[in-house]
Image (cartoon, coloured by chain):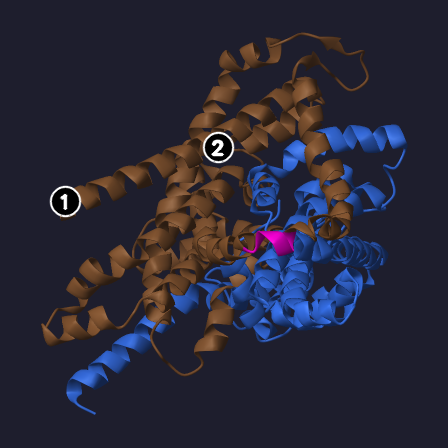
Chain colours: A blue, B brown
């Protein structure tokens, strides 16, 4: 290597370090806060690596009986909203792609631009009239606002790139449209479905604004529960940070494990809910 | 960018018209369920919102049709006008900063280095993480006495700041969080653009002995312009609508110093339960986003024309 190449190499690694460190340092600090006793969290100058580790913070959060309820609520809301979105969105993406009905994507675009709160006002009234407030149903339905456009958008893009030849061959062999979709198109589209699934799960799991309006005491999802901890129950930082980390940990893990799919999905559609 | 790539297969298919005529209705069953869902949760709310905005509609009292009174009320509502100002400042900063930092990061991530995929995964963690959880930790970091940010500032000799606890610094502080969170999205989009650039211009630039900066300014930047524009557009739409971070950290405070349109809309609709007026805000808010998008498109067109004019 010439000296110039060496300098270039060092420069590259310094730049990589500089641009990645805000993310790394933030999450390390988050972990540090969550593992410290109150004394260490209130110390100045701040303690970065504590002498004693407060696993108790996590135990406290997990032991509080409601936290488990909220975790289950989050699972039910995100799970149902994602599942329903895949059921209606994957065939829709297929139909739109095959009909080349690109204008229908405008609806998705409008959904993308509309602030989440504008859906909440009319749907809130609707749920009130139907007497559904106090159950998880309103939140499952309104999370579809986030998940359905993501799934449709990604699946349109995906089905447009899958080859038509196989499908045409199957049609000539006498298969029906539904059979072609079920046995030819769907298996090929599996990677696309994975991308849609991952993004729908993440954006639904993270959603906050729908929950603060629609959730009652028993029907909070985790983000809403964490928000309520800030305002009412908890004042000490350790358990708060622990709760925050527990809420976002599944998402962070998924991000690092499935970063290839996430990057593909975000750059193809660049859709975000809310 | 997708419109371009899609037009070719679509055109090819419509050329084969006779074959197509046998088929069209048969794909409809695939779309119908989604159509029903979209009608119920996207179209219906929109129509209903417009209708409500023309009514005096408060929870617990009878509704009366008032025409455009709610919209007229907006023009003389100082809190709304102030919120529009906050939103614009917040948006401009939250578009420009991530665009600059995201482009620089993309140039770095475009290089080859060990562990690139993993580090890219780490880099995008801020935008995938649960916003409320992030907001909570930032709130602790902003703490004037115990926060780690003031400690870091003290290390380089900068006096302690009040961050989100002072009206003058609250919006820049929130923009800091927003920038930290959304720079990765810009990076990903620009990175996609960089990957699409052919290598020839770089080879000839190298032969001509162009400097790194010259290469970036005269080759890379013009070629990634379309991607920067898309990133800017998406960023604008998200920044205008930003809610979770602002709501969880300041709730629009101190006072109303960080109250954006979205936060004000929340208070009107779900603190005061003035749903008619809230709906009017929602409609105007949507139109404002469309207007901003149109302005950006117009600016982009103008830029293209001047570029062409200069070339000719």
- Marks 1/2: CA distance? 30 Å
Is A141 in the magenta? no
Residue in the picture at 82% in, 40% down: A216
Which chain does the numbered disc 1 sit on? B
Q: Which residue is mark 2?
A: B290
Q: Which one is earlier in the sequence, the residue at label 1 or at label 2?
A: 2
Labelled disc at residue B10:
none
Local crowd size for mark 2, using a 10 Å CA cut-off: few (<14), some (14–19), many (≥20): some
Residue in the picture at 20% in, 40% down: B306
Whether residue A112 is visible here, answered yes or no, is yes
Labelled disc at residue B310:
1
Q: Residue A256, image x and y in percent? A: 57, 72
In the displayed image of the protein, which residue is found farthest to the left?
B208
Q: With B204 as the anchor, is B296 left or right in this view?
A: right
In which quadrant is the N terminus of chain A drawn?
bottom left
In the displayed image of the protein, which residue is found farthest to the front?
B18
Badge 1 vs badge 2, beta-carbon distance below 8 Å: no
- The residues colored magenta run B16-20
Res. B67 image quadrant: top right
Q: With B36 as the anchor, is B11 left or right in this view?
A: left
Residue in the picture at 69% in, 19% down: B51
Q: Is residue A251 above or below residue A230?
A: below
Question: Which element carries disc 2, helix, strand or loop?
Answer: helix
Q: Nearer the viewer, mark 1 or mark 2?
A: 1
Q: Is residue A260 above or below residue A111?
A: below
Q: Residue B37, image x and y in percent? A: 76, 43
In the displayed image of the protein, which residue is found farthest to the right?
A131
Q: Is residue A219 above or below residue B72?
A: below
Local crowd size for mark 1, using a 10 Å CA cut-off: few (<14), some (14–19), many (≥20): few
Q: Residue B141, image x and y in percent? A: 50, 54
Is disc 1 in the same subunit as disc 2? yes
Res. A113 image quadrant: top right
């Amino acid at each position: 290597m010439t000296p110039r190449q060496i300098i270039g190499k060092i420069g590259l690694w310094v730049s990589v370090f500089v641009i990645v460190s805000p993310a790394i340092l933030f999450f390390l600090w988050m972990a540090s806060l969550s593992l410290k006793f109150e004394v260490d969290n209130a110390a100045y100058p701040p303690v970065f690596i504590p002498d004693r580790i407060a696993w108790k913070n996590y135990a406290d959060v997990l032991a509080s009986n409601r936290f488990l309820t909220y975790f289950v609520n989050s699972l039910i809301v995100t799970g149902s909203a994602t599942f329903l979105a895949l059921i209606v969105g994957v065939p829709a993406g297929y139909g739109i792609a095959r009909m080349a009905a690109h204008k229908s994507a405008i609806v998705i675009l409008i959904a993308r631009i509309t602030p989440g709160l504008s859906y909440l006002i009319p749907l809130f009234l609707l749920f009130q009239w139907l007497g559904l407030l106090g159950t998880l149903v309103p939140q499952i339905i309104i999370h579809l606002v986030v998940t359905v456009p993501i799934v449709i958008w990604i699946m349109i893009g995906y089905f447009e790139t899958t080859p038509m030849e196989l499908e045409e061959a199957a049609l000539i062999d006498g298969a029906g449209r539904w059979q072609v979709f079920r046995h030819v198109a769907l298996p090929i589209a599996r990677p696309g479905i994975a991308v849609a699934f991952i993004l729908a799960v993440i954006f639904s799991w993270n959603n906050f604004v729908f929950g603060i309006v629609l959730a009652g005491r028993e029907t909070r999802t985790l983000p809403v529960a964490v928000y309520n901890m800030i305002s009412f129950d908890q004042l000490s930082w350790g358990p708060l940070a622990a709760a925050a980390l527990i809420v976002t940990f599944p998402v962070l893990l998924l991000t690092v494990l499935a970063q290839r799919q996430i990057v593909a999905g975000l750059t193809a559609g660049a859709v975000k809910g809310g | 960018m997708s419109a371009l790539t899609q037009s070719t297969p679509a055109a090819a298919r419509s050329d084969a018209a006779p074959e197509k005529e046998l088929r069209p209705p048969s794909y409809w069953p695939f779309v119908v369920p989604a159509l029903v869902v979209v009608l119920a949760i996207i179209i219906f709310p929109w129509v209903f919102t417009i209708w409500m905005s023309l009514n005096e509609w408060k929870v617990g009292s009878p509704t009366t049709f008032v025409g455009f009174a709610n919209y007229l009320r907006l023009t003389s509502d100082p809190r709304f006008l102030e919120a529009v100002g906050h939103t614009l400042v917040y948006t401009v900063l939250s578009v420009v900063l991530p665009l600059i930092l995201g482009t620089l990061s993309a140039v770095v991530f475009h290089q080859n280095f060990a562990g690139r995929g993993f580090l890219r995964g780490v880099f995008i963690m801020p935008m995938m993480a649960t916003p409320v959880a992030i907001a909570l930790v930032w709130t602790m970091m902003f703490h004037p006495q115990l926060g780690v940010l003031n400690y870091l500032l003290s290390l380089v000799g900068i006096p302690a700041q009040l961050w989100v606890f002072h009206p003058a610094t609250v919006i820049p502080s929130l923009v800091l969080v927003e920038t930290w969170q959304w720079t990765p999205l810009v990076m990903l989009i620009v990175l996609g653009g960089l990957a699409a650039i052919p290598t020839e211009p770089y080879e000839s630039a190298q032969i001509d002995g162009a400097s790194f900066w010259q290469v970036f300014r005269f080759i890379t930047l013009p070629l990634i312009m379309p991607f920067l524009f898309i990133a800017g557009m998406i960023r604008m739409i998200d920044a205008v609508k930003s809610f979770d971070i602002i709501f969880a950290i300041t709730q629009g405070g101190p006072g109303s110093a960080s109250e954006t349109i979205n936060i004000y809309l929340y208070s009107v609709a779900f603190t005061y339960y003035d749903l008619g007026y809230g709906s009017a805000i929602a409609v105007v808010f949507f139109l404002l986003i469309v207007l901003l998008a149109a302005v950006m498109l117009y600016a982009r067109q103008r830029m293209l024309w001047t570029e062409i004019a200069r070339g000719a």
